Image (cartoon, rainbow, N blue to C red):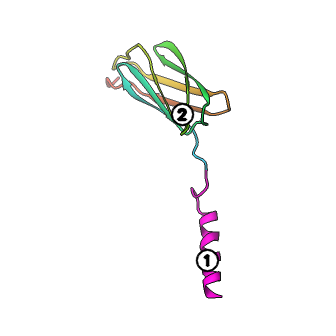
Amino acid sequence: MRRLLLLAAVLAAVAVAPGGLARTHPTIDVTRTIPITVKGSGFKAGERVRVVVRSPGIHRKTVTATRRGSFTAIFRSAASKCASIRAIAIGNKGSRASAYVPPSCGI
């Protein structure tokens, strides 16, 4: 009887624990500035993701998320140290994420 109660208590704790069954939300990160590289995770598997980067021009690319929901978008452009970078990723299944990289030249 004690074992049954202990097992029930453990299962209840796991089911209620934050992150136990929680789905991660989509995120993106600008990992390089030359060339501008945007990596994303937490998107839905196979989702078509439109990535838009502003630095200072506008660059667009559409990529497909992997089975694990990640992607990498590499743009054939570079950002100067004194330019900020804004990136937005919008998936066709409703996922959405954005990132901002401030200028690093000390303005």
Name the residue located 54 percent from the left edge and 30 percent from the top edge.
98
The amino acid pointed to by label 2 is Thr
Q: Residues within 10 Å of mark 1 (few under 14, many from 20)?
A: few
Seen in the image, is 52 located left or right of residue 95?
left
Residue position marked by numbered label 2 in the rendering: 66
Q: Earlier in the sequence, mark 1 or mark 2?
A: 1
Q: Residues within 10 Å of mark 2 (few under 14, many from 20)?
A: some
User: Within the magenta stretch, is there residue 34?
Assistant: no
Residue furthest toward the right? Answer: 93
Which quadrant of the figure has residue 102?
A: top left
Name the residue located 37 percent from the left edge and 15 percent from the top edge.
78
State whether residue 16 is above or below residue 59. Answer: below
State whether residue 84 is above or below residue 96. Answer: above
Tell me where residue 65 appears, x and y as whole percent: 55, 31
Name the residue located 34 percent from the left edge and 19 percent from the top edge.
34
Tell me where residue 42 appears, x and y as whole percent: 55, 39
Which quadrant of the figure has residue 81?
A: top left
Find residue 7 and name its label: 1
Name the residue located 40 percent from the left edge and 13 percent from the top edge.
77
**Is disc 2 placed on a helix, strand or loop?**
loop
Find out whether the residues at labels 1 and 2 contact each other: C-beta distance under 8 Å. Answer: no
Q: Looking at the picture, tell me which residue is in the foreground, 56 or 78.
A: 78
* Region of the chain picked out in magenta, as a range: 1-22
The majority secondary structure of the magenta stretch comes to: helix
The amino acid pointed to by label 1 is Leu
Q: Looking at the picture, tell me which residue is in the foreground, 4 or 97.
A: 4
